[in-house]
Image (spheres, rainbow, N blue to C red):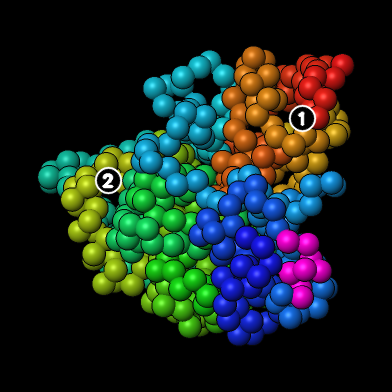
Amino acid sequence: MDEHEIAESLGSWGTEDGPIYLTLADALDELIRAGRLAEGERLPAERRLSAALHVSRGTVVAAYDELRGRSRIVTRQGSGTTVAEHARPVQRLDPVPPRGAIYDGMLDGGFDDLIDMRSAYWVGVDDLPPEAFELPTKAWREVLAGAGYHPCGYPPLRGLIAKHLTDSGIVTSPDEVLVTNGSQQALALAAQLYLGRDDLCVVEELTYPAFIDLIAALRGRLHTTPVDSEGVDVDLLDRAVRRVRPPMVYLMAGVHNPTGAVLCEERRQRLVEYIENWDAVVLDDRTLAEMVIDRPRPLPIARPDGSALDNVISVGSTSKSTWGGLRIGWVRAEAGMVDRLSRLKAVMDLGSPIASQVMVSEMLARSEAPTLRRAELERRRDVLARGLINRLPEWRFDVPPAGLCLWVELPVSDVSQFISIAARHGVGLVSGAASSPDGGYRNYLRLPFGNRVEVLEDVVERLAVAWADHQKRPIRSALYGVIG
Ligand SMILES: Cc1ncc(COP(=O)(O)O)c(C=O)c1O
C-alpha cells in the first residue's frame, strides 16, 4: 500500500486519547495483524506518510520506532522500512503443537536423551521433608471408604486452598475454589468456557508458551501488549483492551514467565482499577507467585480490602512450590463461574486424582514448603546465572528476582542453528520465539533453572562447548553466500 491507501485504510484513527504516535502505531499494527499490510511489504517513507496523514514527521518517526520495538517492522539500510517477516501471529491449522515445542522432553519419556532445558519445571523434592510425600493414614482410610469422585475437588482441600488464598490477600470461600489437574487444566477450562473460535485474547508480548498452544488448539487468536522489567505495562494494556474489546485477557500479574519480572505494587493497584471497568474476563496465572527470591510475594488482583473482582479468574498450582507430578492446581473465581467450570471439568475427567489431593491437603496444612523451596530456588538460579556469566560472557541477561527461568539474549539473529548444535552436545533447548505469540525474540533462549545444581553445572559446560562450536561455523550472509 502507498501512503494514500494507508491513510484511507486507517480511516478515523486519530480519535483515541493518549499520545498521537501511539494511536498511529496501534492503528498500523492493526493493518499488519489483519494482513492488509503484508509481511515483507515496504512502508512509505516517514515524510510521505506524515503528509498523507496530516501529522508531523516526528509522529510517524515515533510510531515507526514503536512498531520496531514490537518487532512488527524492520528498517534496513538500503531497503527502507518493511513489515517484519514474522509480524503476524501464526494461525496453526493443526491443533496439536509441532515437535520442537516445550513438551518434547516430557512426552513419551522424552524423544531424545537430552538434558531437558525446554520446560520450566522443578526437578526432585530433596529440599522438602520426605514425610510431606506420604499419604496421611487416617485421612486416606476415610477417603477409601467413599467413591473418590469429587469433580469440584476433595472438600477439605477446597477449604485449605480458600484459606491459603485468603491469607495471601484475596478473601475466598471454598465454593470459590475448583481443584484442577495442575494450573494447565485450570487455564484450559477457563479458555474453553470464555473464548470462542476466532475470538481475540489479549496477552503479554512474552508469555507462557503452553498458553499460546492452548489458544491455537481452541482456534482463538492472540493480541499482544508490551511487558518490561516491572511486568506488564498496565496503561498500554488498558488501551489495548479498550480498543480490541476482547472477551478474555491472560496475564501473569504476579511473577512473569519467561522474564521472572514481578509486577510492581503501583502498577498492580492501577491494574485493579482498570479491570473494574473492563467487560473482559481476566485470567490471572499465579502459578509462579510463590517462586520469589529477591522480592516479597506479589499480592493477588483484589481490591484494597481483599475482596475479589467478579471478572477475574485466578489460577494457581502446587507444581512449583511442591511437585508438578502431583498435578494439583486450582481456579479461584466467583462462585457461579466456579460452578460452570466444575461442570465442564466433570465432563472432561470427573475429578482430579484423590490421592494427590489428600497429600496436597496435608502439605497446605503444614505450609512450610514454599519457604524451603525458595532457598533452593535461589541456589539453582545463582548456579546457572554465575555459570553463564563466567563461561558465556557474550550472552546477556538480567538476574530475575523471581520465577524459574533466565531470559537470555544471544549475539545472533536467530538461535535455531545454535539449538541444533546444543542438541549434539546433549542439551535440549527451545527458542525464545516459543514465548512470543508474534514469533519474535528469535535471538533469545528461555533457560529454566529448576534442575538440580549438578545438572545445571553440566549444562553450562555443554553450552559453552556448543557455543564455541557455533562460533567456529561459517557465517552465512544473504548478500555474499558463505563467508570464511
Ligand atoms: C506460567 C505457568 N502457568 C501454568 C503452568 C502449568 O503448571 P502446572 O504444572 O500447574 O499445570 C506453568 C508451568 O510451567 C507455568 O509456568
**Residue shown at the point (48%, 57%) measured from the top left:** 222
Asked if residue 49 lies in the magenta stretch, the reply is yes
| Quarter holding residue 64 | bottom right
Segment colored magenta: 44-51
In this rendering, position of residue 288 left or right of residue 465 = left
Residue 242 seen in the figure: yes
Horizontal side of residue 84 vs 246, given as left or right: right
Q: Residue at x 68, y 25 (%)?
A: 417
Q: Please say if 4 is above or below 385.
A: below
**Residue placed most toward the observer, 25 or 76:** 76
Give how far across and how far down residue 41 sits, in percent.
Answer: 65, 51
Seen in the image, is 384 located left or right of residue 436? Answer: right
Query: Looking at the picture, how far across and down is residue 400, in whole percent?
Result: 72, 49
**Tag 2: residue type?**
Ser
Ranked by sequence position, the earlier of labels 1 and 2 is: 2
Is residue 66 on the magenta stretch?
Answer: no
Q: Camera-side residue: 7 or 194?
A: 7
Q: Quadrant of the N terminus?
A: bottom right
The residue that mark 1 highlights is 478
SS state under label 2: loop
Local crowd size for mark 1, using a 10 Å CA cut-off: few (<14), some (14–19), many (≥20): few
Query: Which of label 1 and label 2 is nearer to you?
Result: 1
Residue assigned mark 2: 352
The amino acid on which the numbered mark 1 sits, given as a three-letter code, is Ala
Tag 1, which secondary structure?
A: loop
Question: Where, by quadrant of the figure, is residue 43 drawn?
Answer: bottom right
Residue 382 in sight: no
Q: Main secondary structure of the magenta part?
A: helix
Residue at the image position 59 percent from the left and 33 percent from the top: 430
